[in-house]
Image (cartoon, rainbow, N blue to C red):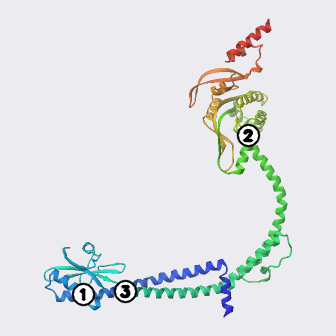
Amino acid sequence: MNTKILPILRAFKSRLSRKIAFGVFTSLVIIEAVLLVPSIQKKELEILERSRAITQGKVEWIANNFRQASGTELLAQVQQLQKDVMLKQIVGGIVYEIDGKEVGEFGESPTLNYADIKSSEFSGLNRPSLNRRNDDRYDAAWIVPTAKNIYVVVIRHNVDSLNLELAMYVWGIVGLVVIIATFLTLTTMLIVGENVITPILRLREDLNAAANAVSQDSSNHDFYALSERRQDELGDVMASFNQMFEQIRQEMRDRKAAEASLKVEQEKAEQLLLNILPEAIVAQLKESSDAIADRFDEVTILFADIVGFTELSAKISPTELVIFLNEIFSKFDLLAQKHGLEKIKTIGDAYMVVGGLPTPRPDHAEAVANMALEMNEVIKQFKIDGHRDLQLRVGINTGVVVAGVIGLRKFIYDLWGDAVNLASRMESHSIPGEIQVSEDTYLRIKDKYVFEDRGLINVKGKGEMRTYFLRSHFTTINISDPTNLRRSHNRKLEKMTVDAIVKVKN
């Protein structure tokens, strides 16, 4: 006997076996409950109908023997039913005339009222069909015709004793269900424990031993899975175990070799990330994957576009075009690095750079202006056979922006704000070979550079705005050509320069 019980006890030690036992037991209880609920409901109806039948017999006796009774006399006869030994469950009642007028009531007032009776299909005295159960109370109604009128009699019953009888019946059924479910569950666990749970527990021990062998790189191992021979699915699992173990050991060896090369690749990836994003932003991304957005109260943005690029792209091959753009933008990247500016992105033949972020600097406008002037010089170095010299159209604006990285993939450090939009408008409304700046930028560096007032122009989305063309730094003015001085809007400096020319001629 112990040899049969021990596998069951061992099986119940595992979490899996307890889940199986719970599932089997619960399923059996639910199935049997579904099958037995109708019988319980049928038993309840039988008990209530038995009580109702006794009362109905007395009501029929009153109807047959008191045909000349008035409503008050009928109520008195119904009330006398409480004194009947067989009708101790009657605790109250009420009598209505057929039009709904109440004749009188006694004891507890029934919850089944005349409105309920009137709204239902009611069979009458011989085939009563109207009743209502409320916890331990049960109301039943009958129509009683007499020579004087037709009456509706509603009697209230105390069904406590009937509930007890029903509860005993229910608990008997429940006990039977539990016994059957328990027996079937134990039988199932005996079979499952011997054929499934015990081998699984042994396999778990093998897995722990295999983990130790792998971590210690040990070649000595003696597993249960290697000694057991089974011709079923668990046997297939055991056969696969040894193969898996050998594969894991080999993977561990390969992993150690790969870790060294992975470290090199991580360093390359780090460098690549630094080529894409500013170092400060890379550091923030390592700490958190949340969106990064910082406000900068004063930066200067530059947009540059190659004039005639669309026409040029139609006349040379895509490969030549990409090589050509790469050469140009590589030169621009070196200029951005030279002036300490942050390249944001290139879109087609457009180049965007900004000064004053992610690390603020006071001379951001001067740095961008210097780069713009050098970009115009750099572009002159590039020529393609059969095409005219290349020119840039450049726009610059200074203002407030929000800069950061958003999204989950293909990160790019970008700018947002009205200042960015206006810088783009400065570029698109400029003319070939010119560097157009907004008035905000002009006011910040007007004392250090030569400008030409373009006057008021209609800027899309902004209306009329005064803009300026950046010509050169003051140190680059050719004093032998006084016409250059007329392009400056710094009148005080112009006068000083003219005085210097007069002195030279004298």
Numbered tag placed on residue 162 in the rendering:
3
Q: Dot 2, crowdedness within 10 Å: few (<14), some or many (≥20)?
A: few
Q: Which residue is mark 1?
A: 81
Query: Which image quarter holds the N terminus?
Result: bottom right
Residue that appears at 83% across and 56% down: 261
505 in relation to 241, above or below: above
Between disc 3 and disc 2, whose residue precedes? 3
The picture places residue 229, in percent across and down from the top left corner, at 77, 83
The picture places residue 319, in percent across and down from the top left corner, at 76, 40
Residue that appears at 66% across and 89% down: 5
Q: Of tags 3 and 2, which is closer to the observer?
A: 3
Residue 50 in which image quadrant: bottom left
| Callout 2 secondary element | helix
Question: What amino acid is at disc 3?
Answer: Leu
| Callout 1 secondary element | helix
Residue 378 in which image quadrant: top right
Q: Is residue 403 left or right of residue 150?
A: right
Numbered tag placed on residue 318 in the rendering:
2
Q: How many marks can you see?
A: 3
Q: Dot 1, crowdedness within 10 Å: few (<14), some or many (≥20)?
A: many
What distance separates the C-alpha of mark 2 from that of mark 1?
109 Å
Q: Is residue 314 visible?
A: no
Between disc 2 and disc 1, whose residue precedes? 1
The picture places residue 147, in percent across and down from the top left corner, at 13, 83
Q: Is residue 14 left or right of residue 476?
A: left
Q: Of tags 2 and 1, which is closer to the observer?
A: 1
Between 317 and 397, which is closer to the camera in this rendering? 397
